[in-house]
Amino acid sequence: MILSSSQLRRAATLQEKIEDLQQELAQLLSGSSKSSSTTSSTAEKPAKKKRIMSPAARKKIADAQRKRWAKQKSVAPAAEKKAK
């Protein structure tokens, strides 16, 4: 069986992933909380990236909120007059 260089690289990457997962599984099964907590905390860090909104998006959201507040304030006095 002859593999291309890209297939060999892909196979090597998969092999490394398999070895990492086997180590993580062994740590979980051994009950070693120190090593598994360090492993899991490092694994979670990339997933917790801070979301950054553009200034235009912030302005759009703020304008929409101001519009909702204005609508609510304008409806409230009319509702009170009808109740009296």
Image (spheres, grey):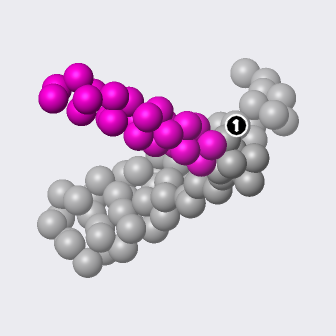
**Considering depth in this image, is 43 or 48 the residue closer to the camera?**
48
Residue 67: percent from the left, percent from the top?
Answer: 55, 37
Seen from this angle, which residue lies furthest right? 5
Residue 75: percent from the left, percent from the top?
Answer: 38, 30
Residue at 30%, 70% in the rendered image: 37
The residue range painted magenta reads 62-84
SS under mark 1: helix
Residue 21: percent from the left, percent from the top?
Answer: 41, 50
Residue at 55%, 44% in the rendered image: 66
Residue 33: percent from the left, percent from the top?
Answer: 20, 72
Q: Quadrant of the C terminus?
A: top left
Does the segment drawn in magenta span residue 80? yes
Residue at 17%, 64% in the rendered image: 30
Does the segment drawn in magenta span residue 64? yes
Q: Is residue 69 left or right of residue 34?
A: right
Tag 1 residue: 10
The relative height of residue 4 versus residue 34 in the rendered view (above or below) is above
**Considering depth in this image, is 76 or 32 the residue closer to the camera?**
76
